Image (tube, helix red, strand yellow):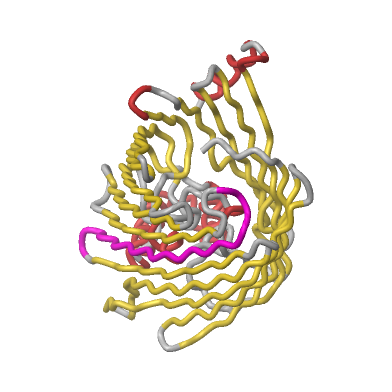
Amino acid sequence: MKALILSIASLSAVHADDFNTWVKASTNFIAGSQGESELPRHAHDPAEDLYIQALEMSFNFEAFGWLSGFTNISTFQVNSNEMDAEIEEAFLKASNLPYGLEFRGGRYLNRIGTQNSTHLHGWDFADANLSTIHFLGDEGLATEGIEASWFQEYDKGVIGLSVSYGKVVAHAHHEEEGHDEHEDEHHEDDEHDDDDHDEEEDEHEEEHHDEHGEEGWSDEVLSIRGLIRHNHTDQFQSQLGLNYVTSTTGSDRNLYGVDYTFTWRENGLEVGGDSFSAGIEYFNLDNGEENFGSAMLAAHYRFANGFGLHTRYEWLEFAEEHGDEEEFVSRERFSIAASYTHTFNEDWSGIARLQYNTDFFEGDSEDEVWLQIGFSYGGKAEVR
């Protein structure tokens, strides 16, 4: 990380003609209601009846025609009286290289599946997909490392391959919350049982991760994503993605995934017009002892006037302890949403989204309703 900061600082001497910077910002406010279950959630999912879901700001630069950089800072509400902030991504990128090669180094969201590398303001729904929550972690999978990518265009589309190796980013604010709660319960015994306490806490954390088939990525991981994007015509496109994540140290976790998205655009490759997309995504998590599966079906119709209709069905399985026994259980969620996106000018846009979820778990159901309002600044795309 120090090397990344020094590299960015050194670029301040670059001539203005070779150096371009821009800022993007977004904010999401949300109001609604949810049930009282303790099912796993993404750290940035709605969690309060009235909630500041995120205040995101990104800093981007380009230089020399081949070097670029990106830093994203997210501020969010953790409870009714407390805000927290974190650097989600901070990396340098070398692109426009021979043979279609690209390299990223620093902290980044891994290119896995259809959502993990997307920031909250780019999600299709107000909350994260179940596969992201259970299989990639409560904030998705982010690493500090290096990524090599290869993209090759052909007459009908593009073929790509990204390979990343790095250390998993620990999200300190979650660890501190859990530590504080545990510390309050056992404060009197800390002076005598520090070693035992730490060992038991680590064991409990590992058991929790195994129990729900979620999180669990630690130390260093290797991730691979391959894709083929094919334009059948200017109006019809398909994209196929293949995904793999493995823990290279510390555990025997392996994640396999495949996703397919079909898209129709009324105006073809030009901007504007109605559009429709539908996709399916499947993951299988092998933790060395058991296998867990997940599947998602989603469809979106976006009208040229800014309105959109969205639906999502998800199924996921994991193991849960009942006394001394462990059994497989499943979780299902059905979501419907309506949205309206409005562009005020070349820099400012806004979105309003009304969403309803029904979550099924062990014979019970839980309903949620959310109204999300978001604003975005910055017309130029982020460095990705």
Q: Is residue 384 above or below residue 14?
A: below
| Residue 162 horizontal side relative to residue 334, left or right | left
Task: Using the rendered image of the protein, determine whether residue 197 is visible from the camera's viewpoint.
Answer: no
Which residue extends farthest bottom? 363
Q: Is residue 288 above or below residue 364?
A: above
- Percent coordinates x, y for residue 82 in the rendering: 71, 55
Q: Is residue 274 magenta?
A: yes
Magenta segment: 270-289
Q: What's the residue at 57%, 55% (across, down)?
A: 267
Q: What's the residue at 46%, 60% (across, down)?
A: 263
- Percent coordinates x, y for residue 156 in the rendering: 37, 45
Q: Is residue 208 above or below residue 22?
A: below
Which residue extends farthest left? 289
- Percent coordinates x, y for residue 278 in the rendering: 45, 66
- The one of 231 and 348 positioned closer to us in this rendering: 231
Q: Is residue 244 above or below residue 312?
A: above
Per the picture, the main secondary structure of the magenta-coloured stretch is strand
- Percent coordinates x, y for residue 146 in the rendering: 39, 32
Residue 57's image quarter? top right
Residue 6's image quarter? top right
- The one of 324 and 114 positioned closer to us in this rendering: 114
Q: What's the residue at 43%, 49% (across, down)?
A: 141
Q: What's the residue at 26%, 43% (across, down)?
A: 248
Q: Is residue 291 magenta?
A: no
Residue 174's image quarter? bottom right
Task: Using the rendered image of the protein, determine whether residue 98 is visible from the camera's viewpoint.
Answer: yes
| Residue 46 horizontal side relative to residue 231, left or right | right
* Number of disc labels: 0
| Residue 12 horizontal side relative to residue 159, left or right | right
